[in-house]
Image (cartoon, rainbow, N blue to C red):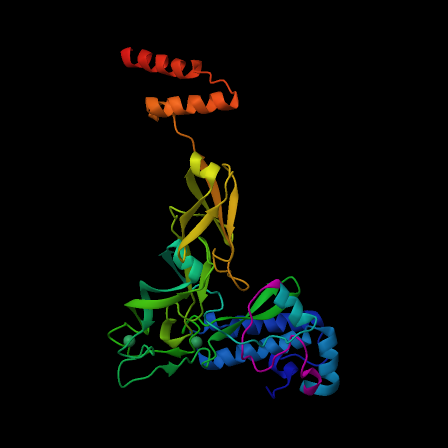
Amino acid sequence: MDKDFYELLGVSRSADPTEIKKAYRNLARKYHPDANGGDEQAEEMFKAISVAYEVLSDPEKKARYDQYGINGLRGDAGFNSQGGGSFDFNLSDLFESFFGGQGFSSGFTRNSQGSNDVQAQVEITLSEAAFGVTKAVELKLDRACNVCFGSGAKEGSSPITCSICSGSGVTQELRQSFFGQMMVQNVCSTCSGFGSIIEHPCESCSGSGVSIQDLTLEVNIPAGVETGSRLRLSGQGPAGPRGSSPGDLYVSIFVEVDDSFERHGDDLVGVQNISFLSAIFGINIPVKTLDGNEMLHVPPGSKSGDIFKLHGQGMGRLRGRGRGDILIYINVDIPSVKDLTEEQKQLLKDFAQSTGEEIDESNVNHTLFEKVKRAFS
Ligand SMILES: [Zn+2]
Ligand SMILES: [Zn+2]
């Protein structure tokens, strides 16, 4: 860019803004890439006049250019005489490039949108969730083609540099924006942003550089995960086209419902049935835990709803150390009168008599009457 900006636009140094704009418009129409079928010289010219116009249409930049030449603009926000790099077109970047920040230069990455990510689901048991587990996940994923090793080019050939964007993967375009006319950079449509073109595509992958493969991935699932937990395996997603960076693999966890425990965060809640006699006299009873069996001491006089805690026997904590607890709810089984033998009924009546409590058997009879009625209806 050593040509004089006024010369480039074909205007005199005393040209007014309208003249400059008009000159630029005419030239832009002439050299626009769309109008020149990808001609490299036209492309270069288009870039050059665009930069020239960017400066001369801005009174402040124009003043600096008039006084110091191109050196007056070096390091200027929003000015990039090289035309390399790229810039995502959004308002915040726009502001940044005009009012500070790094201007137009920012690396171009094909996967910046994260569109190349993939999801997988893994089902695990409660116990696996408590302790963590390594699971083999089978899935079909794009991986680098094993014929061309991801290049997309046929054996013995290699991709050639894109002549439209000179390998940068981006092209420049002049746009009307909120701030007036400005240069924006677009993904090069000729090479789709790769910066290179494959003349002789690999026959195995048709030039994509990837092929779908059956994979078994070992996934380390940490202790404490729950249904809905999502693990991100960075870079383990599908291979990007033509050797570009791979996406991420997201693994969603589904924890199976457990027969013995209900989960409450890091704690597990279970229910232990005991007989009314055990409730009265107390009992040592084995209860199932994640680690095996644990002897639970239920003291005499326990009631339904009493809770016993097994410290540190619950779920591993996803964040932090140690484990939650197991809470055992006691449920006292009260036998139904219909399940009692005549002898047992008599013993209970004798017990009642000893405490002075009266037994009201009308409800029992009522129930029997109901039963009979139902049987005949
Ligand atoms: Zn291939
Ligand atoms: Zn290109």
Quadrant of the drawing holding the C terminus:
top left
Q: In the rendered view, does 50 fall on the left or right side of 191?
A: right
User: Residue at coordinates 68% horizontally, 69% vertically from top-left?
Assistant: 18
> On screen, 205 above or below 115?
below
Image quadrant in which you'd find residue 103 = bottom right
Of the four image quadrants, the one with ligand 2 is bottom left
Chief secondary structure of the magenta portion: loop
Magenta span of residues: 71-91
Q: Position of residue 43 (x, y in %)?
A: 49, 78
Residue 152: horizontal and vertical position, in percent? 32, 77
Q: Quadrant of the N terminus?
A: bottom right
Find residue 102 and report its image quarter.
bottom right
Residue closer to the observer: 340 or 129: 340
Q: Residue furthest front?
A: 354
Is 1 left or right of 113, judged from the image as shown? right
| Numbered marks: total | 0
Give the camera-side residue of 148 and 56.
148
Please tell me whether residue 191 belongs to the stretch shown in magenta: no
Spot occupied by residue 214 in the image (x, y as percentages of width and height): 27, 66
Q: Nearer the viewer, residue 376 or 136?
A: 376
The residue that appears at 35% across and 81% down in the rendered structure is 159
Residue 317 in the figure: left or right of residue 369: right
Give percent across and percent down for residue 197: 37, 78
Q: Residue at x 48, y 73 (%)?
A: 109
Quick check: 280 left or right of 52?
Answer: left
